[in-house]
Amino acid sequence: MTRSPIGRRIVMRLTLPARLLPCLWICAAFAGELPKVLVVESYHAAYLWDAGYTGALQHGLAGRAKLSFFEMDTKRLPKESHAAMGDKAWALIQASKPDAVVLGDDAALKFLGPRLAGSRLPVVYLGINGSPTTYLDKPAPNITGVLERPSIRQTLLLAKQMQPELKRILVLLDTDLTSKQMYDYTFQSRPRQMVAGIDVSVQLVDTLAAWQKAVQSFSGPDHALLMLTYFSLKEGERPVSGQEVLEWTTGKAGIPTYCNNDYAIGRGLAMAGYVNAAAEQGAQAVPLILAKLADPMRVMPPVTPSTYRLLISRSAIARWGIAVPRELQEKAEWVD
């Protein structure tokens, strides 16, 4: 029996891959116009983390959504102005009436999440170091997102593998909101603890001078340094660039330095680390955005990327004369 053209169309629709169904629903809902998605960045476009996830969003949503961006700039602006930047972002949401909002990192969720919770506007966050419930004071079926769980323990264990004599590690952070959430969530607000036989000290500092003092006063043949966050340090009123902090630290520290950002490992930079990729956060957010555009009130639990890349710098290994175990050599991505 020959099927009618209508029958063939029905069969084709039913056999489309499930990943394409949100696209069909979105096309039907927006009648040929691309939905508008406003991305609120906690930081600024030139910050490498932001560049990573916004690039992934642009790639993943190309031809499926029209993106616009707002920068809260909380890495460089004084803390007392952050709430005002949240107000500006909120005013933009009300004026531009986007079809969905993406909240990049903790500050955006803190200042905008409570205002958006419970509405029918689709909201997807990413790069959240704390618990979303810290910021959302009521259930919010219209909100979901991507959590960021830095690979800190893996990097501490990596340091022990690369330096078998290792006894102490200093973990340094700045004092922005992300750092405080990381300190509370990952380190349970404990400034000193034992991890796999390593004496781990954690310090949060807000000035370049305090950072430099911490680095210069921590040294020894069985010591190492782990840099986690360093983009909101100040020298007087001047915001200090993260690159300046990174280069000074790796140049002046008399001990091997580790980091958990892919852009911080290489020649003249940190030696190694299990890294978080901002692009992965953006890529993980794309299907959530599409699903929320199709069904804003669908309850969706947050997702957490579970894999990390191991990066090792050849030049830093040579500088410190470290013999990398074979198992690490085989799994690492070697840079420079």
Image (cartoon, helix red, strand yellow):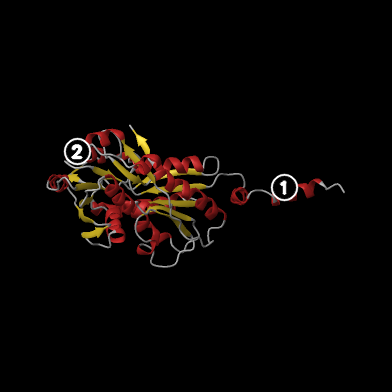
**Residue 146 sits in quarter:** bottom left
**Residue 265 sits in quarter:** top left
Give x and y (percent) for residue 147.
40, 55
The answer, for residue 74, to whether it is visible in the render is no
Residue displayed at 40% across by 50% down? 92
Left or right: where does residue 182 sit relative to residue 144?
left
Circle 1 sits in a helix, a strand or a loop, which is it?
helix
Give x and y (percent) for residue 293.
54, 53
Q: Is residue 104 above or below residue 271?
A: below
- Residue beneath disc 2: 248
Q: Nearer the viewer, residue 283 or 82?
A: 283
Location of the C terminus by quadrant is top left
| Nearest-to-viewer mark from 2 and 1 | 2
Give x and y (percent) for residue 16.
66, 48
Amino acid type at image mark 2: Trp
Give x and y (percent) for residue 124.
45, 54
Q: Is residue 316 above or below residue 120?
A: above
Residue displayed at 33% across by 54% down? 107
Residue displayed at 32% across by 44% down? 273
Query: In the image, which disc is placed on residue 136?
Result: none
Q: How many marks?
A: 2
- Answer whether labels 2 and 1 touch (C-beta < 8 Å): no
Q: Is residue 111 above or below residue 263?
A: below
Amino acid type at image mark 1: Met
Q: Residue furthest bottom?
A: 138
Circle 2 sits in a helix, a strand or a loop, which is it?
helix
2 or 1: tag closer to the N-terminus: 1
**Residue 194 sits in quarter:** bottom left
Left or right: where does residue 332 sit relative to residue 237?
right
- Residue beneath disc 1: 12
